[in-house]
């Protein structure tokens, strides 16, 4: 049975993306070396995962001095947003309210944290509101 390709990042893909987000354009050798501090993956495994990320459009690569340099083509924020959207869709039928209620019921989100989040939402709304208002006339 053929494996389906998903836009979601696997744990191994995410691990390599984190290295690219942190260090920028890197060769397979550079990624392998940076990964060595947390775990050992074979050079060929890292190469395969990076090629899969390239095929998925998550990284781009440029040939320099006989080596490909890989760099993210999606931001960490965009990848996180997509992962959250997919999780909410799969687990909560697309309902953000159900996600928040579940977090409250399982005590992963305390009332204090919820108040902190409300303050952040209010501040973001103020920034957005200020950005959409016309600037004062120049005199």
Image (cartoon, rainbow, N blue to C red):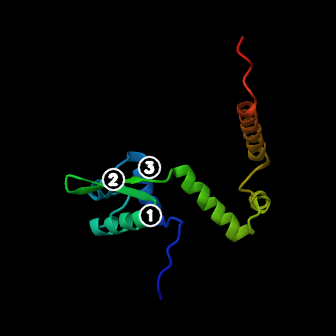
| Image location (x, y in percent) of residue 123 | 74, 35
- In the image shown, does 111 or 47 lie closer to the viewer? 47
First reached walking from the N terminus: tag 2 or tag 3:
3
Which residue shows up at 36% across the image and 66% down it? 51
Q: Is residue 27 above or below residue 116?
A: below
| Image location (x, y in percent) of residue 37 | 34, 54
Q: Residues within 10 Å of mark 1 (few under 14, many from 20)?
A: some
First reached walking from the N terminus: tag 1 or tag 3:
1
| Image location (x, y in percent) of residue 53 | 42, 64
Q: Is residue 134 above or below residue 97?
A: above
Q: Which residue is mark 3?
A: 21
Q: Which residue is mark 2?
A: 34
Labelled pair 1, 3 in contact (Cβ < 8 Å): no
Is residue 103 found left or right of 4 in the rendered image?
A: right
Q: Secondary structure at mark 2?
A: helix
Q: Residue furthest top?
A: 139
Q: Which label lies toward us, 2 or 3?
A: 3
Q: Residue furthest left?
A: 65
Which corner quadrant of the image does residue 86 belong to? bottom right
| Residue 41 seen in render | no
Distance from Cα at disc 1 to Cα at disc 3: 12 Å
- In the image shown, does 105 or 129 lie closer to the viewer? 129
Q: Which residue is mark 1?
A: 13
On-image quarter of the C terminus: top right
Is residue 105 found left or right of 31 in the rendered image?
A: right
Q: Secondary structure at mark 1?
A: helix
């Amino acid at each position: 049975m053929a494996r389906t390709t998903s836009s979601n990042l696997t744990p191994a893909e995410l691990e390599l993306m984190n290295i690219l987000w942190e260090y920028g354009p890197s060769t397979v050798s550079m990624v392998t070396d940076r990964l060595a501090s947390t775990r050992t993956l074979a050079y060929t495994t890292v190469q395969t995962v990076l090629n899969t990320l390239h095929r998925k459009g998550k990284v781009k690569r440029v040939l320099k001095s006989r080596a490909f340099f890989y760099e993210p083509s999606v931001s960490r924020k965009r990848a996180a947003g997509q992962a959250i959207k997919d999780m909410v869709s799969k687990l909560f039928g697309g309902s953000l309210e159900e996600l928040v209620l579940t977090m409250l019921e399982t005590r992963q989100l305390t009332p204090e944290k919820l108040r902190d989040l409300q303050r952040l939402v209010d501040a973001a709304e103020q920034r957005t509101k200020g950005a959409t208002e016309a600037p004062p006339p120049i005199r």
